[in-house]
Image (tube, rainbow, N blue to C red):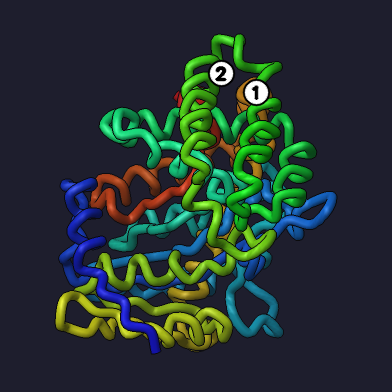
Amino acid sequence: METFDTSEIRKYTKMMAPTADFDSSYTFYYDETNNIRKFYVNEFDFNSAFTENFVLGGLVHKGSAPEVQHLIDSFKLQSTAKEVKFKHIAKGNFLDCLNSQKLYLFLKFIKNSNLYIHYSSLNLLYWSIVDIVDSAIVNSEASQKLGPQFANKLKNDLYKLSRLEIDPIISLFHSFKYPNIKKESILPFIEALSDLFESYIDDIEFHFGLESLRQLLKVAKKEGSLPFIMDGEDFILIKDFSQSYLRPIYLFKNATHIFDSEDSISRIVKNYKILDGTSEIKNYSFVDSQTNRLIQLSDVFVGLIGKLSGYLNTSSRDKINSDFGSITSIQGENINLLLGLIDKSHDKNIGFLHTLDSEEERSKIVVIREKML
């Protein structure tokens, strides 16, 4: 068993998010979507699509849980359905899902109840490339002093470049066994990566971020070090998603966390002895979703957020603007309910919403909000 003392990371997170309430006794229910177990690069592609985020989340409440059986009865599921699943409520792509009357019943009920939503959404490609930027910055004291806003700008521009040059990025990662680059390969890796900047670096949209990163990579060449991408496993971009499960357990240490039973994850999580200083944190359980209605309803919410992430990651702002200029009445009601539910939960506790994604993708939700005004 591995001991994991979380006191310092909890202290740091609370400092970075001073308005979040990580100390109250909430009850969290969880399900996940797009859990591909592992994300790695092959010779010509990734092992799975990178355009849908891994999402872990669901419903949360303080005090007593509301009675939800009458909501489930309103879905009028077939008698053969052993539990509520997202597929019973809505199907198709994100816009198709917004046409569901059952989804309307679900979102309206949650918004008007004492339930809130919570989620952690992880963009697979973005999370796979951010260590390049962090490795470059760690070689420069001046850049470290510029803080997270500077780092996030560089990460966002590198992500946008990676989306535009995805095939060369895949080839680059495979050639250098990223993220396990050998010391003798640091110089050729940096040169190959920097070559991809050339067509974009004079573009005003990219110039500051890519030029700043290029200069930092020159320093890294002299140092012969990109520390965060030198000690991984060959080709393994994301080994597993256990950190997404561990994070709420130790951050909301006074809460109760009820996860849908997932053997591969429960084995990993149970292998950790999670400490807050000298105190062990034992605040979670894994249960069969068929025995817990709120986990089943969490599956509905998380499924919808997964569809939303796929839509945002594959749609331009112009397309989003066009799509939401011609939606049906029920689509409009559902998107407004979803946005209202996110706002309700954000206002209750900003700590409920956690996103590891680029500003490029996160900002697209603003296009929808502005269109729905």
Q: Residue at x 37, y 29 (%)?
A: 150
Indicate whether 86 appears above or below 369.
below
Give the residue at x 38% y 84%: 2
Q: Nearer the viewer, residue 28 or 172?
A: 172
Task: Return the x and y of residue 82 as percentages of the image width and height.
Answer: 63, 85
Q: Is residue 169 above or below residue 184?
A: above
The amino acid on which the numbered mark 1 sits, given as a three-letter code, is: Phe
Q: Which of 210 and 279 is in front in this view?
A: 210
Judged left or right of residue 154, residue 173 is right
Indicate which disc residue 262 carries.
Answer: none
Query: Does residue 156 appear left or right of residue 318 in this picture?
Result: left
Q: Residue 217 placed where, x, y %? A: 52, 32
Task: Label 1: state its secondary structure.
Answer: loop
How many neighbours does mark 1 have within 10 angstroms: few (below 14), some (14-19), or many (20 or more)?
A: some
> What kind of residue is marked 2?
Phe
Residue labelled with disc 2: 206
Q: Work out whether residue 229 or residue 62 is closer to the camera in this orientation and state it.
A: 229
The image shows residue 83, relative to residue 174, as above or below, that is below
Quadrant in the picture for the N terminus:
bottom left
**Upstream in sequence: badge 2 or badge 1:** 1
Quadrant where the C terminus lies? top left
Asked whether 221 or 30 is in front, the reply is: 221
Q: Position of residue 273 (x, y in %)?
A: 32, 85
Closer to viewer: mark 2 or mark 1:
1
Find residue 197 and name its label: 1
Describe the element under mark 2 as helix, strand or loop: loop
Circles 2 and 1: CB distance less than 8 Å?
A: yes
